[in-house]
Image: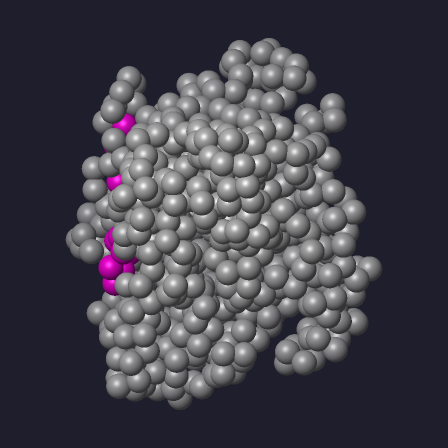
Amino acid sequence: MITVRVRTILTIKKILGKGELEFSISEGSTLRDLVATMVSRWRELSPHLAESTTGPIPRIRFMINGRDIAFLNRMETVLRNGDEVLILPPVSGG
Amino acid sequence: MYKGGYTGKVLRINLTDQTAKEETLPLEIAKDFIGGAGFGIKYLFDEVSPKADPLGFENKLIFASGPFSGTTIPCASRMAVTAKSPLTNAVGVSLTGGYFPVELKFAGYDALIIEGKAEKPTYLWIKDGKALFRSAQKLWGMKTTDCQQIIKNELGDQNVRIACIGPAGENLSKIACIINEMRAAGRKGLGAVMGSKNLKAIAVRGNGKISISDEGKLKSARSAFAEAMKGSPVLYPQFSKLGTSMVVDHTCAMGIFPTRNFTSTGEYAPADKLGVEVQTTRNVGSEHCYMCPVGCSQLKMARTGVYAGILAEGPEYETMFSFGGVTGVDNIDAIIAADRLADELGLDTMSAGVTIAFAMELYEKGILSRKETGDIDLRFGNDEAMLTLLRQMAFREGFGALLADGSKAAAAKIGKGSEKYAMHVKGLELPAYDVRGAKAHGLNYATAYPGADHNKGYAFQEIFGIPVPYEVDRLSAEGKGKLTKWNQDVRCVTCDCATMCAFLLDMAVPAIALKNTADLMDAVTGLQYTPEEIQTVGERTNNLAKAFNVGAGFTRKDDTLPERLLTEPLKGGASKGHFISKDELKKMLDEYYTEREWDIQTGTPTRKKLTELGLGYVADALKL
């Protein structure tokens, strides 16, 4: 098993009840596996964590250790012990 | 000549002669520059020497909205104010919203050009094609809310819209702003330009209507626009309720919310003190600009201590950064109070806060003593000190007098190696993103014509993950020259020239902005452009602004970033370890100049590029 830390804000933080949580997941798990684990525990997360299918503004943004997953292996990125997964709901302005 | 959108008239005010002259807006200017910043930069280049003293007689102030302002197109009540900036000595363009922009259109004008200098404090009264010069003797010294109210009372019309300066502009602080309602043409010290002309305020009232070339086409274009707004996952669901405050949480999470003069970004990320959860406890209402269905401006009231009861329109994200993040102040009520005070005094909240933060770092390091600060304890986080300094800066009193002209000027006077702690580019203080974690955003700070202005080339791809025109790795320096050119040209034309709200570009129409602008131009004005031709308007405007700056003496060496961002990796947070190395900056600049077809050695636009953009006369003027 490995441990990863999830950090998040705003709508996602509200659903989870806090902005930082640790998850124990199987070694070799991908980001997709982690999201499935989270959704199975908090069903209301499901629409928020679904990948965008319409429009140019992403509905959710994932970073692993500060790096956008588009520059890793997207949802198939394999997580490692100690990774920090940042989940960012859509934000703009400023 | 004009089928719609434009009034076709420019009002030229000579404060020396006390004359007001109506001129026709040349169709070629409308076609080539569309409006707003395009008009401002065109008139500035053509009529003001780049060597002019920004606070001297020769400088001019140009107020210009765009062809959509005053129509039923939403989110188009915006105006660009342009002059040679006293803060930077470069082109200064500052945008504002609210109601003043459309009122000037209703009064009959696409643009207002202010030249000369009044003998005594004066305000302008422009109503339906007539302009009067009125004494502002009793207004001089007034804060901006009082000034606006007294003028309304004097004119017997509470619906007059007013743009004015506060004591900061009167005292020629180079970080003075222009306030209209509770909005600001905040940056670049344009309030000091007004002050240098003894112009306290401009009051406007108009009953005109803006014609539309083709109502059928407008209905179709507006409908596409409205669909994009409704389809945004952030515009109505989040932004209309929270405004820009949610960006604090976002950039703290990304490790790029600057704190303590950019010394602790990522390490100290005070979302719990300054973010949405705290800010919403102070919300008492919201404000809309003219014809805006979003209403993102949040009215906030301070609740505790000596600040209780103070109301502000904001603070917006940039002000949460400048009075909260970089100063280390974590008292939300103090920040609300500082925001209101800066607006009343007519100070740019961004430059004021970052300049105070600079002084705080010097104090923390022992470079400034308590004796030198006039017994003000300038440790990070001291909210009382921050508010005291704002008053002193506006009135050039005490230690604040040293800070009244921004961080670059203060560093030059203080010496002692303080220059490396002044966080500015070309004299314009940095905005609310630590670009060590967003490299195209940083390249824009380095190359944008007014200095470090995030709104001239915002890298929303890096900050918000929007994959338009493509996905971007914020932590890589590759391809950032090309991206920055695109960001600068698209934002320039769709937001600053067409004077549409930039939040729409970021949240609703990033993928269709150029086509959307072309369709709206066709519908409203009858002028037809392809999306590529629309983008060319932005490129033309940016090139003309750069040409002015070249004439003012700016070269490649001025396209840079503060030393801290080029040598100190971020110490904590999600962007830990990252910075922009000097080698990376060099490569990004080389790529940027290549994309722009400018001279790589000097950063100067080439004759070939200028001619291609219809600016051959500019190449002649620069002797290229």
Residue B419: quadrant of the picture = top right
What percent of the width, then of the height, locates residue B620?
74, 75
Residue A19 can be seen, yes or no:
yes
Position of the C terminus of chain B by quadrant: bottom right
Describe residue B63's horizontal placement relative to residue B127 as left or right.
right
Residue B131 higher or lower than A73, as above or below: below
Q: Is residue B556 inside the magenta stretch?
A: no
The total of numbered circles placed on residues is 0
Image position of A84 with respect to B199: above or below:
above
**Residue at 37% in and 49% down:** A49
Residue at the image position 41 percent from the left and 24 percent from the top? B330
The residue positioned farthest toward the right in the image shown: B601
In-front residue for pair B485/A30: A30
Residue B296 inside the magenta-drawn segment: yes
- The residue shown at (28%, 55%) is B236
* Above-or-below relation of B380 to B320: above
Q: Check the picture and name the quadrant holding the N terminus of chain B.
A: bottom left
User: Can residue B499 be spotted in the picture?
Assistant: no
Question: Could you tell me what secondary structure mostly forms the magenta stretch?
Answer: loop
Camera-side residue: B145 or B75? B75
Please provide the residue range marked out in magenta: B288-302
Q: Position of residue B257 (x, y in %)?
A: 51, 36
Q: Position of residue B181 (x, y in %)?
A: 30, 48
> Image quadrant of residue B574?
top right
Residue B284 against residue B95 in the figure, above or below: above
Residue at 32% x, 26% y: name it: B333
Q: Where in the figure is residue B617, as x and y percent of width and height? A: 69, 77
Q: Looking at this view, is B91 or B330 the one in front?
A: B330
